[in-house]
Structures are given as structure tokens and as C-alpha cells.
Image (cartoon, grey):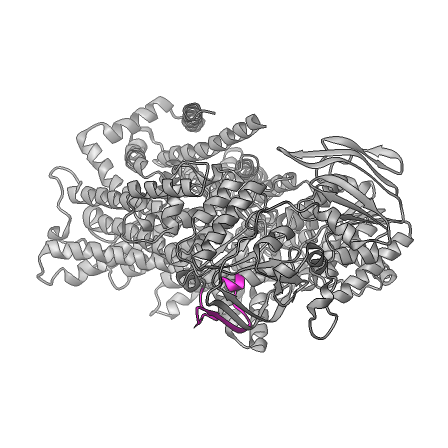
């Protein structure tokens, strides 16, 4: 199916998420939509798959203009979308999951459905047990099933949103084979990704989005450097690099392994010193969050040791970590960081030390006022946190950090903030470093990682790189590592290969 | 929108809710062939018609005040302590047990009564901690854990009344043998009202009000109720705080049970909680968990309960009319609040 | 005790379980769609009274049953409207209705107290009722008890074997995914909440016209049944067959409490009668404990093989509610 997007615009409040996008994708193509987080990839795909409607613009399928009202409507038009976290029903059986919403008689003939599904499976060499429960399948298998389901429903256009996140290498090979078969059958495959390696090995054309705009379209052979530049744009000047003298070791990880149901990070050794900033780079879901939260004491490592200021904290509770000067600052400010319904003053009281049973509200309000001024928060002590803007909420989160702290673990410290706010936040964080704190932070912004970190750990599909010296690493090198290029296939890591 | 304007909108929606609740109750009355105005007049007359009647309202008000006060604590922590009925009951059982143990001991009655009150609080707190432990360590929703424990508490009462604590001769639904007069909380002459009970109730509300409003404990509890994840990450031991909320509420419910035994019934009866736990939940919902409104609204609800007692005699109507009106008030308050938010959402678009 | 009297008693257990089955399966349908209807206890009482009043007044058993169902459907409509359209807490609205409908039942039922009314006759099924043992046990009941057998099977088939049933599961489990597959989430929720409410309502006349015929106000002995039905819904893991098992177990325990009392003088009857409740709490504990955080923490300290084994055991016992239970759905 020949897909055309003509002048698509979509606004969310003041954010121009899709800005005049024109795109043509012929049948038989495997077309990549490339861009960093927040570039507008998902918005565009949601428009095409009927989740949201464009504010302006037209979609044409095989030359005919169509209006897509809902995802179910999209599939009627032959457009199926495979979501990053497959939209399926974990506690149900595979076959039941497959049948939800499928057309047909009220009582489906399971035997027939299973038989024809098995045939369809064979076509792609899939071997999913149709009587298994969904939650026993891997993400890769759940994807395969979604693909089968969409094809079964007659999808001619298949949109895949970050499909290679969270699946194993052999599954990826299988996925790519499948997509090539589909393209060979004349179907249209749209591959949304920020992984350069995947795009390079699979796609017939690449459209790069940045900040809602289509910044370029490239055909193979791809020049990786060019793609990286297009994706991340020109480097914004973040000012001079702040140099902080480093002190003794704060955090020591020895043969540290962590695991969740998706992945396992094995045998990490790391020493973080007072005043040091370590950036954790990688695409979302590559294991960096698990790593960060385990350092915060929220999860337990399955093997290895975690030492804080020479004290063994392995397996201790989160509150022990908190009491010994570790603070985790989550990314979802309103869900995990702040407490909607409480004022700024109340937050400062909660985060502060308790000296007596009753709160001295007058004094607390004064302290709150001082902090509000110090951290440049646009609000009053009585302002409810949910009434603050994002940047102010983030500054409030920082203002809540106690002094002194040994270790600050931050998730996306400046996501969604303008450059000025970001620079301000980092000036405050560097101040913390000067006071002797060590900082580990996750960011999707490569410039932020390179500019503010002393060393960098790169995460890719559950693998962790050894610490890289930030001064000696370039945006291109980092972008490629994040995209899975330049990793040693086996054996020891040789950073020199990273270029 | 200015604060003032949205306040007026709030009040007008709440007023509409009251009107709807009255309208609903009136329709019910008409449907059952009763004269609505006369019924309402009866309720008013039956509750504030005389000083004696009003003193009865106060008798009912104290346990309701205590349970609602306790529920403010659990609601602040975001918990639905439906098990409060059982907590009242266990309070009454512990109080009765202590009184039975010490009634012939020769200790001064005042001391025995104080010990009895403390025993009641202990009983309620223990029963609540069971529901709390099931919730925080067993993952059992507090609504179902609490309900199950309510039934067990009722059975325990029946067993005691018909078994170990039965009246000389044969046990009956009228309860255990009444305690001698000197083990009653002293009453104002000519009424069934004990001024001590009223004082206990008001002190309890004042203490909880101050704790919730001014203490670190209260603030953390509020944080846990509003966002348990953030609270945990900010360093609050959330499980411990939820348990404390249960125990505090249970202690107050147990105190209500102790008051029922020492100041109202002077013995253990099968339905010793009189439904004040569930009624307290309604009051707490209606006042939207604002402590200052506890006094007037629980007084109003107690007045409805007492005022409707005479309905069967005068109008041959069931006294549960008060429950219908109370339920309708809360229901329409909730619904009108939903309508208000919906209207505001639409207006913002 | 003779075999005959045991059979008669067990047949009574099957009949006594019928209203609980109606209520718990009705609630299962509503909760499967993602809506908790906490009003069950009040609904059953109001429907029992209403069904009895209608049956007495116009002397028609069928209309009595239908009146009970109508009451249940209307109460459920209030729950659905308040929670889906007005986005109020399902727990709050349901709880208020549970109390209010109970009082309403006692208030409106006052004139019908103690009246003698019609009773649904038992209707032995020809041939089948003559089968030894099974006949007297299963097939000498009244039509509502037969209906309860049918409901168990039909509800199970509907939820697990039909396309609409699969959509129902999907809506409760992950509304966003069901929406993508073309389901109208809120309409589905309204539909099953009301249908489930009608079944809960049917439990009322099943009591007042059959199991405990008549209306006796506060001493009808029905107060509390609704809460049990709610617990059995959880115990049954939202599966009609497991739910029915829970209902039969409960009715059996109550019967045993009555029967065994004379032979166990040391244990008062009240203890045996509430035996189902601690068991219910224990059952809820078993199905829920695998979801708690401290268990995960303890597990993490165990060696790999033991950890995997215990995790699997807990997982198999676990009854997880429909994932979106109580959560409003907002389409993007």
C-alpha cells in the first residue's frame, strides 16, 4: 500500500509535535523514521494509526484521501501498529489474546483458528505455543504474535514502534527476516527507531525527525555520521565545562549484577568518587534505570557488593540508603517525585530533618521562602506542587535534596526543560559536587551526558560498557554505541574500536 | 477563575445535592404513602423537641464522633477502614472483659473505668492492626480483610454472650448481665447522657485535629495518602505509617465501643457497635475528610438517627428513614461533585 | 444421620448457594469489565424486599423475580454512571449504596413484614429426578436453583469461549489494548455493570421467594450475604466455576455448622457459622501474598533454584484481579 502524508500538523498545547510533515512511502518499502526521544516520531505514527487526529493535513492511501478515526478504523484501512510495549493482554492465553476483537461468529472455532495460525506461523518460521499464557512469552514472541494478528486482520501497512527494544539478538534477526519477507510481499513497513545499527541493516529509506520537523530523507548507503548530525542537530553551547576536584570513593560496586524480568546486567565494577558525575547513556529500556534504582537500594543486586563510604550496603533496605545520604530523584515528577495536593512548604518539611514532634509552620514557611528564592522557583510557599510548571517542579525536586548527601541518583534531570533551566539545574548539581556529593544520572540527551559527566557508562540491550572518559568521547561515538554499533561481539572491550 | 467564584460554584453544587437528597427522600415517603412534611417534622421534633431528646442525640453523637475522628486518620492515609465496626466491637468486648475481671476487686470505680477505657482502646487497636497487617504485609485489600473481621467480631460477641459470659441461667439476645451502677460513667441526672463521654469525644477530636494538622506524623500520613510512591521515595516508611493509621483509628473505635459499654448499655449486647462505624464512614465522606466539619455533621447525623426512632410509633414508618436520608445526602454529594468537575472540564476545553 | 437426610441436607446446600451464585457471578461480570459494584449487600436486600412486595401484591412469581432484577440493574446503573461518566470513586459510591439500599429495603418493606406470600414451588425434573443419589440431590429443586446451574456454565462459556466474552476480559485487563482492537470500553463497562447488577438483583427474590421465603425486615437474616458474595468473587479468581465452588463451599460450611453443632458441644454454633469468614481471609491472603513487596525481597535473598520454585508456586496460587479494576479509562 502506498502511503502519503501531506502537510501533517499536530499541536499539544504550545508544543508543535508534528510540523508540516510531508512523506511518501511506497509499498514494498521498509522505511525508517529516525529521531531522538521527543522528536515527534510517535505523534506522527499515532496520527497514521488513528490514535489521534491531525490538526491539519491529509493522509492518502493508494492515492485516496482517508480519514482515520480510531485504531480499529486504521486496521479497516489496512494500517496496523505494533507498539513498543505490545498492546496485548498478559494474563490471557495466546490464542485468546489473538481472538480479542477479531471478526467472526460469536463462538469462534478455535481448532480452525489454531490450524490456520500455525500455517501463518510456518510462513515466517515462528514457533509460538498458541496454548501458552502470554506472560510466559518474551517480548520478542509477543511482537511476533502481534505481527501475525495484524496480518491476519489484513494489514497492508505495518508500523513498528521501537521494535528492537527489549528483544534478544536472535529474535531481532528473526524480526528483520520477517519484515523483509513482508516487504517482499508488497506490504509497507514503517520502522520507528532511534537505533542506527538497526536502521542501517534493514531499511530502504530513512526519514529523520527533529523537534517535530522532517529534517531530511536519506537512502542507502547510509553515512552514520550524517544521520547522527541530523538526529541530534547542532550542539547547543552549554557554557564552559565545570571542573570539580574529586575526593575519596563514595560508591563502590564489585561484581555487581542486577536482574528484572526483562534483562540482566552482569558483573559491573565501578568506583565513583566524591565530586564525580557519571552519565548513564542508552536508549530507554536498555537497563540503565534498573542499574540506577539498584544503586539507590530500591532493588537488590542478585550478586556482588555495593559499598557506600566503605560501608557494605548490599541487600539493605531503601530507607537505610536514604538515611546514609543516598537520594534518588525520579523522572516522573508528579508520580514519583512530588506529592500532588501538598504545598511547597509541606514538601520542604517532609524532606527535611525532624527535630520535634510538631511542625513550626511559621519557621518552615520562612525556610521554604528562602529555598524558593535560592532555587528560583516561580511559586509561593503555599503553592500546590501540581500548579507549578515542569521546570519549577524540577527545581523544587532539587531544592528538596538534603545537605549533605553522599550520592545523588538522577533520572533525566533536565527532560522537558528549556536550555536556561537546564543550565541552572546543572549549576546547582555541580555545586553539590563541590560539596562532596557524587552524582549518577540518566539522560537521553547526548550533549548533556558529554558536557556534564566525568565518565560515561553506555547501556545497550542489557550490556554495560566500561566507564568511558567523557573528555575523550565524541557525540558520534556515543550515538553509535547507544545505537549498538562499535560494541565488541565477543571478548574484551577495546574502547579504541568505538570510533 | 478566581478563588471566590469557584467557591460559589462549589457551594451551589453542594446546595443542589442537599435539595436532590431531600427530593429523593420525599419521593420515597410519598411512594410509601406517608406524609413527608409530617415525617420530617417528627424527626426534627424527635431530636431537638426537648432537652431530654437532645441529650439522647448527644448520647448517640459521642460514639459517632469518635469513629469519624478515627476514620479521618485512615482516610488521611488513603485507607478504607471498613473494619471499623469490628474494632468498635472488640473495644466493647475488651472493656466488658476488664470490667468483669475487676468489678469485684475492690479497686476504686474511677480507676476501673479508666482501665476499662484503655482496655477498649487496646482491643480496637489490636483488631485494626490485624486488618492493617493483612493489608500491608499480606496484600489483602483492607475492605475485605476488614469486612471479614467484622463478621468474626460479631460472632465473638455472640459466643461470649451465649457462652462464657452468659447471664445466670440462660444466655439471651439482651446481652450480658448489666454492670452495677458504680461502674457506669456518671450521667447527668434525668438524662442518659454522660458528660464524661462528651468530654472524651471532644478531646479525641481535638487531639487528632492537632496531630493531623500540626505534627510531622500527620503531614507524613497525608503524604502517604496522597501519593504512596513519592512518599516512599522521599524516605517515609510507608508500611509503618499505614499500620499506625490503622492502630490509631482502631484505638478510637475501641474507645467508642468502651463508651457504648460504660455509658450507654452498661453491658455487652450483640449489636454493640450500633452501626456507628459505617455511619462514621458516611460522615467522613460527606465532609470530604475535613476535621472541622466533624462536629456539626456527625451531630446532624446523630440527630437524624434519634429523631427517627419515634417514626414507627407515630407514623408507622420504619426508623431506617434516617439511613435513607443520610445515604442519599452522601450519594448526591458525590454525584454532584462529579457533575461539577465534568462541567469545569468542559468549560476549560 | 440417614443417607436420605444427608442427601436432603446437601440438596438444601445447593439451593442455598443459588442466590450467592447469582450475586457472585453478577459481580464477576461487572468486575471483569473493570467496575467494582460494592453495593451488592444493599442491592440483595432491596431486591429481596422489592421482589417479595411485587409477588405478594400482584401474586405473580415471575414478575417478582423480574422486579428484583430491575432493582439490581438500577442500582448498578447509578454505580456505572457515577464512576464511568462522573469519575467518582467506585468504592465510595458503592459503599454508600450498600448502606442506603439496605435502609431503603427496611423502610419500604415495613408494610410487607411477616406477610405470607407466594413461594416458588420445587419442580422435580421428570426422569432425571429418579436417578439414584443424583436425582434427589440435583434435580428435585426449584427453577431458580436450576437457573443457577445453567448460569455457572453459561457465564463460564461466555467469558472464556465467545468473542464478546474475550472482549469483556480485554476491557477489564487492558482497556487501551481492547480499544485498539475496536472495543467501546465505556459502553462495555456500562453493559456488564448493569447486567451483573441484574443478576445480583436476582439473588434477592431467590431468597425472599424461595430459600428464605418471606420478608422479615432486619431479622430476614440476609444482611451480610452481599459482602460474602463479594469476597467469593475474589476467592473465585473472577472465574464462574471457581466462584460457584466458593459459593457451594460457603453454603456447605454453614450447613455443617448447623448439623454438627449438637455433636460438638464444646464448639458454640456461632463459631462454626463464622468459620467461612476466617477461611475467606486466609484464602484472600493466599491469593494475594505473592503480590507483596516483602515477599519479593525475601525471595531475592534465596538461592536461584529455591527462588524460582517458590515464585512459581506463589504465582500459580495468585488470583490477580482484572488489571484495570476500579481505574477509569481515558481515550487519548
Q: Is residue C181 magenta?
A: no
**Residue at the location (58% across, 76% down)?**
C304
The relative height of residue B40 versus residue A266 in the rendered view (above or below) is: above
Q: Position of residue B319 (x, y in %)?
A: 34, 35
Q: Nearer the viewer, residue B178 or A329?
A: A329
Q: Position of residue B36 (x, y in %)?
A: 37, 24
Residue B135 visible here: yes
Q: Position of residue B175 (x, y in %)?
A: 25, 53
Quarter of the image for residue A262 reads bottom right
Magenta segment:
A293-317
Q: Is residue C211 left or right of residue A84?
A: left
Q: Quadrant of the C terminus of chain A?
A: bottom right
Query: Going by the picture, which residue comes out furthest to the right?
Result: A185
Q: Is residue B267 left or right of residue A26?
A: left
Quarter of the image for residue C241 reads bottom right
Q: Position of residue A364 (x, y in %)?
A: 32, 44
The number of numbered badges drawn on the structure is 0
The relative height of residue A4 versus residue C276 in the rendered view (above or below) is: above
Amino acid at each position: 500500500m502506498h502511503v502519503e502524508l501531506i502537510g501533517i500538523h499536530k499541536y499539544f498545547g504550545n508544543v508543535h509535535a508534528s510540523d508540516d510533515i510531508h512523506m511518501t512511502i511506497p509499498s514494498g518499502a521498509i522505511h525508517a523514521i529516525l529521531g531522538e526521544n521527543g522528536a515527534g516520531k510517535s505523534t506522527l505514527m499515532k496520527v497514521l494509526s488513528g490514535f489521534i487526529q491531525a490538526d491539519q493535513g491529509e493522509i492518502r492511501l493508494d492515492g485516496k484521501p482517508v480519514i482515520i478515526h480510531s485504531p480499529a478504523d486504521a486496521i479497516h484501512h489496512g494500517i496496523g501498529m505494533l507498539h513498543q510495549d505490545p498492546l496485548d493482554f498478559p494474563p490471557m492465553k495466546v490464542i485468546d489474546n489473538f481472538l480479542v476483537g477479531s471478526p467472526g461468529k460469536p463462538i469462534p472455532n478455535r481448532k480452525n483458528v489454531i490450524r490456520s495460525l500455525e500455517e501463518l506461523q510456518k510462513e515466517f518460521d515462528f514457533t509460538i505455543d498458541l496454548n501458552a499464557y502470554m506472560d510466559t512469552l518474551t517480548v520478542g514472541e509477543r511482537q511476533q504474535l502481534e505481527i501475525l494478528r495484524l496480518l491476519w486482520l489484513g494489514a497492508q501497512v505495518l508500523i513498528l514502534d521501537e521494535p528492537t527494544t527489549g528483544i534478544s539478538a536472535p529474535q531481532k534477526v528473526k524480526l528483520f527476516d520477517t519484515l523483509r519477507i513482508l516487504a517482499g510481499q508488497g506490504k509497507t513497513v514503517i520502522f520507528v527507531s532511534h537505533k542506527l545499527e538497526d536502521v542501517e541493516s534493514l531499511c530502504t529509506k530513512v526519514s529523520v525527525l527533529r523537534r517535530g520537523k522532517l529534517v531530511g530523507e536519506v537512502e542507502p548507503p547510509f553515512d552514520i555520521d550524517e544521520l547522527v548530525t541530523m538526529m541530534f542537530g547542532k550542539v547547543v553551547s552549554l557554557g564552559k565545562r565545570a571542573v570539580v576536584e574529586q575526593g575519596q570513593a563514595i560508591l563502590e560496586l564489585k561484581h555487581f549484577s542486577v536482574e528484572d524480568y526483562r534483562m540482566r546486567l552482569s558483573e559491573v565494577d565501578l568506583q565513583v568518587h566524591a565530586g564525580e558525575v557519571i552519565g548513564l547513556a542508552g536508549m530507554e529500556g536498555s537497563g540503565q534505570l534498573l542499574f540506577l534504582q539498584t544503586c539507590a537500594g530500591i532493588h537488590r543486586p542478585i550478586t556482588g557488593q555495593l559499598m557506600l563510604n566503605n560501608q557494605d550496603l548490599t541487600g539493605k533496605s531503601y530507607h537505610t540508603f536514604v538515611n546514609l545520604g543516598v537520594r534518588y530523584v525520579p523522572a516522573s515528577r508528579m508520580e514519583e517525585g512530588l506529592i500532588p495536593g501538598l504545598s511547597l512548604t509541606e514538601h520542604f518539611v517532609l524532606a527535611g530533618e525532624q527535630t520535634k514532634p510538631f511542625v513550626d509552620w511559621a519557621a518552615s514557611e520562612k525556610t521554604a521562602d528562602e529555598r524558593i528564592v535560592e532555587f528560583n522557583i516561580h511559586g509561593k510557599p503555599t503553592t500546590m506542587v501540581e500548579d507549578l510548571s515542569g521546570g519549577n517542579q524540577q527545581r523544587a525536586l532539587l531544592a528538596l535534596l538534603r545537605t549533605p548527601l553522599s550520592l545523588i541518583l538522577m533520572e533525566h534531570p533536565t527532560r522537558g526543560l528549556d536550555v536556561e533551566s537546564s543550565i541552572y539545574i546543572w549549576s546547582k548539581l555541580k555545586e553539590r559536587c563541590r560539596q562532596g556529593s557524587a552524582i549518577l544520572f540518566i539522560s537521553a540527551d547526548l550533549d548533556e551526558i558529554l558536557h556534564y559527566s566525568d565518565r560515561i557508562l553506555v547501556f545497550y540491550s542489557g550490556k554495560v560498557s566500561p566507564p568511558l572518559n567523557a573528555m575523550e568521547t565524541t557525540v558520534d561515538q556515543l550515538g553509535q554505541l547507544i545505537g549498538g554499533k562499535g560494541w565488541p561481539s565477543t571478548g574484551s572491550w577495546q574502547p579504541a574500536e568505538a570510533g | 477563575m478566581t478563588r471566590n467564584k469557584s467557591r460559589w460554584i462549589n457551594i451551589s453544587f453542594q446546595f443542589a445535592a442537599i435539595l436532590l437528597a431531600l427530593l429523593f427522600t420525599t419521593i420515597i415517603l410519598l411512594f410509601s404513602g406517608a406524609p413527608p412534611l409530617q415525617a420530617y417534622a417528627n424527626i426534627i421534633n424527635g431530636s431537638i423537641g426537648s432537652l431530654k431528646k437532645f441529650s439522647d442525640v448527644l448520647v448517640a453523637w459521642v460514639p459517632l464522633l469518635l469513629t469519624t475522628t478515627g476514620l479521618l486518620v485512615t482516610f488521611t492515609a488513603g485507607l478504607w477502614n471498613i473494619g471499623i465496626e469490628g474494632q468498635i466491637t472488640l473495644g466493647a468486648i475488651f472493656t466488658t472483659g476488664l470490667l468483669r475481671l475487676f468489678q469485684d476487686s475492690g479497686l476504686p470505680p474511677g480507676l476501673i473505668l479508666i482501665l476499662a477505657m484503655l482496655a477498649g482502646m487496646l482491643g480496637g487497636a489490636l483488631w485494626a492492626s490485624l486488618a492493617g497487617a493483612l493489608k500491608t504485609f499480606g496484600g489483602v485489600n483492607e475492605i475485605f480483610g476488614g469486612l471479614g473481621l467484622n463478621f468474626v467480631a460479631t460472632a465473638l460477641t455472640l459466643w461470649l454472650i451465649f457462652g462464657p459470659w452468659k447471664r445466670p441461667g440462660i444466655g439471651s439476645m439482651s446481652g450480658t448481665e448489666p454492670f452495677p451502677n458504680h461502674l457506669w460513667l456518671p450521667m447527668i441526672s434525668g438524662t442518659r447522657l454522660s458528660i464524661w463521654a462528651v468530654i472524651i469525644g471532644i478531646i479525641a477530636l481535638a487531639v487528632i485535629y492537632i496531630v493531623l494538622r500540626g505534627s510531622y506524623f500527620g503531614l507524613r500520613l497525608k503524604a502517604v495518602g496522597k501519593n504512596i510512591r513519592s512518599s516512599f521515595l522521599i524516605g517515609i516508611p510507608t508500611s509503618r505509617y499505614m499500620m499506625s493509621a490503622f492502630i490509631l483509628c482502631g484505638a478510637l473505635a475501641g474507645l467508642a465501643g468502651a463508651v457504648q459499654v460504660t455509658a450507654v448499655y452498661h453491658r455487652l449486647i450483640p449489636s454493640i457497635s450500633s452501626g456507628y462505624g459505617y455511619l462514621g464512614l458516611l460522615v467522613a465522606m460527606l465532609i470530604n475528610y475535613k476535621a472541622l466539619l466533624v462536629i456539626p455533621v456527625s451531630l446532624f447525623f446523630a440527630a437524624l438517627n434519634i429523631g427517627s426512632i419515634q417514626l414507627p410509633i407515630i407514623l408507622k414508618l420504619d426508623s431506617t428513614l434516617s439511613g435513607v436520608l443520610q445515604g442519599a445526602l452522601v450519594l448526591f454529594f458525590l454525584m454532584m461533585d462529579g457533575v461539577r468537575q465534568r462541567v469545569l472540564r468542559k468549560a476549560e476545553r | 444421620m440417614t443417607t436420605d437426610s444427608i442427601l436432603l441436607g446437601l440438596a438444601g446446600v445447593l439451593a442455598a448457594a443459588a442466590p450467592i451464585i447469582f450475586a457472585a457471578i453478577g459481580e464477576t461480570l461487572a468486575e471483569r469489565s473493570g467496575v467494582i459494584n460494592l453495593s451488592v449487600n444493599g442491592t440483595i436486600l432491596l431486591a429481596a424486599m422489592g421482589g417479595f412486595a411485587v409477588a405478594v401484591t400482584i401474586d405473580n412469581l415471575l414478575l417478582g423475580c423480574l422486579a428484583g432484577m430491575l432493582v439490581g440493574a438500577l442500582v448498578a446503573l447509578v454505580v456505572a454512571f457515577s464512576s464511568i461518566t462522573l469519575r467518582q470513586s467506585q468504592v465510595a459510591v458503592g459503599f454508600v449504596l450498600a448502606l442506603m439500599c439496605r435502609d431503603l429495603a427496611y423502610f419500604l418493606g415495613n408494610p410487607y413484614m411477616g406477610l405470607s406470600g407466594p413461594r416458588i414451588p420445587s419442580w422435580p425434573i421428570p426422569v432425571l429426578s429418579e436417578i439414584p443419589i443424583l436425582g434427589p440431590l440435583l434435580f428435585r429443586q426449584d427453577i431458580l436453583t436450576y437457573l443457577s446451574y445453567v448460569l455457572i456454565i453459561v457465564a463460564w462459556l461466555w467469558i472464556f469461549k465467545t468473542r464478546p466474552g474475550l472482549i469483556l476480559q480485554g476491557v477489564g485487563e487492558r482497556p487501551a489494548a481492547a480499544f485498539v482492537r475496536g472495543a467501546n470500553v465505556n459502553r462495555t463497562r456500562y453493559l456488564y455493570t448493569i447486567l451483573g447488577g441484574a443478576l445480583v438483583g436476582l439473588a434477592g427474590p431467590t431468597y425472599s421467594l424461595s430459600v428464605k421465603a418471606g420478608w422479615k425486615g432486619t431479622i430476614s437474616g440476609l444482611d451480610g450475604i452481599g459482602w460474602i458474595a463479594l469476597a467469593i468473587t475474589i476467592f473465585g479468581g473472577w472465574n464462574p466455576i471457581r466462584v460457584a465452588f466458593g459459593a457451594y463451599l460457603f453454603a456447605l460450611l454453614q450447613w455443617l455448622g448447623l448439623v454438627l453443632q449438637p455433636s460438638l458441644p464444646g464448639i458454640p454454633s456461632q463459631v462454626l457459622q463464622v468459620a467461612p469468614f476466617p477461611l475467606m481471609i486466609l484464602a484472600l491472603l493466599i491469593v494475594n501474598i505473592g503480590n507483596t513487596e516483602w515477599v519479593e525481597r525475601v525471595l531475592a535473598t534465596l538461592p536461584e533454584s529455591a527462588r524460582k520454585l517458590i515464585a512459581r508456586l506463589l504465582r500459580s496460587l495468585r488470583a490477580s484481579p482484572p488489571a484495570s479494576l476500579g481505574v477509569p479509562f481515558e481515550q487519548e
